[in-house]
Image: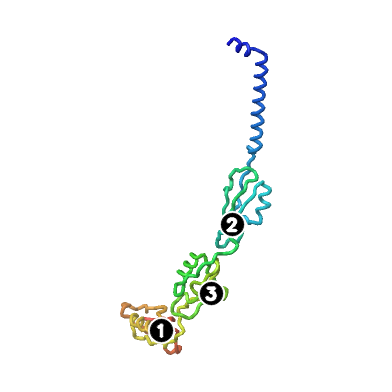
Amino acid sequence: MQNLFNFLKSKVFAVQLLFATVLLTLIFVCTYQWLNAYTRHGETVTVPDLKGMKLTQLESFLQGKNLSYKIADSSVFILDKPAGIVVEQDPIPGSHVKENRTIYISITRTVAPQVKLPNLIDVSQRQAEAILGSYGLKVGSYIYQPDLAKDAVLAMSMNGKTLKPGDEIPKGSTIDFVLGDGIGNTEVSIPNLNGLTYEEASFVLKGSGLIIGQVQYDATIIDSANATVYNQVPAPGDTTHLKQGESIDLFLK
């Protein structure tokens, strides 16, 4: 035990202890510096917002920020957006990452997916528009043809080519509608409504495929239910025929 105490008090032990302390310190400092250099501790960049940018712009844009990109998904299709537009990214904008980090992006596709044209024949214009929109298709122009079914879809076309339900077309395509104008091709004689009540005149017109237009009552009328037609436009002698779906104005007294 005495020898141990003597050794601890000796210059040899002091020199060895100092040497060991310096060596450990050097090892710690070097290790720290190496780890700091390896991990580039503290050297980060802020991820920019790439959404909405064109794919052709990314290369030069990210090079100046010491970042790169990789396409993770190119199957996204968004109506009214051109191809090659960034719609999603990872990491998100504002994140802090190390230099040369890769940003994974999703871009809009170059070719639109195919969709089957729904059956809109005989469907009303408003309902057809809503259904078409749910399929990712656009409404183009309206072409009216004589038909008693007013604003009902009679046919569909794209770029002048007639389509039929079930045809596969690119999503985002514009579809033109052929609609009924509410007036058929069939012509009927103008009935004489003079002396009839409103209900009687309505019954006669309905049987002829015609409708009541404007109705004007005489100022002196007391009982509208028993009022009778004293004039009509057009009158039976004004023109030979009307097309089904057209109207006749009534004057009652």
Q: Quadrant of the N terminus?
A: top right
- Up the image or down, 46 lies above or below 113; here it is above
**Separation of residues labelled 2 and 3 (CA atoms):** 31 Å
Amino acid at dot 2:
Ile
How busy is the neighbourhood of tag 3: few (under 14 within 10 Å), some, or many (20 plus)?
A: some
**Separation of residues labelled 2 and 1 (CA atoms):** 66 Å
**Mark 2 vs mark 3: which is more N-terminal?**
2
Q: Residue 188 is drawn in which quadrant?
A: bottom left
Disc number for residue 232: 1
Q: Quadrant of the C terminus?
A: bottom left
Amino acid at dot 1:
Gln
How busy is the neighbourhood of tag 2: few (under 14 within 10 Å), some, or many (20 plus)?
A: many
Q: Residue at x 61, y 43 (%)?
A: 97
Amino acid at dot 3:
Ser
Question: What residue is disc 2 on?
Answer: 107
Q: Residue at x 63, y 46 (%)?
A: 101
**Separation of residues labelled 3 and 1 (CA atoms):** 41 Å
- Estimate the x, y position of residue 13 in percent, counting from the top left: 65, 16
Q: Residue at x 33, y 80 (%)?
A: 199
- Up the image or down, 169 lies above or below 221; here it is above
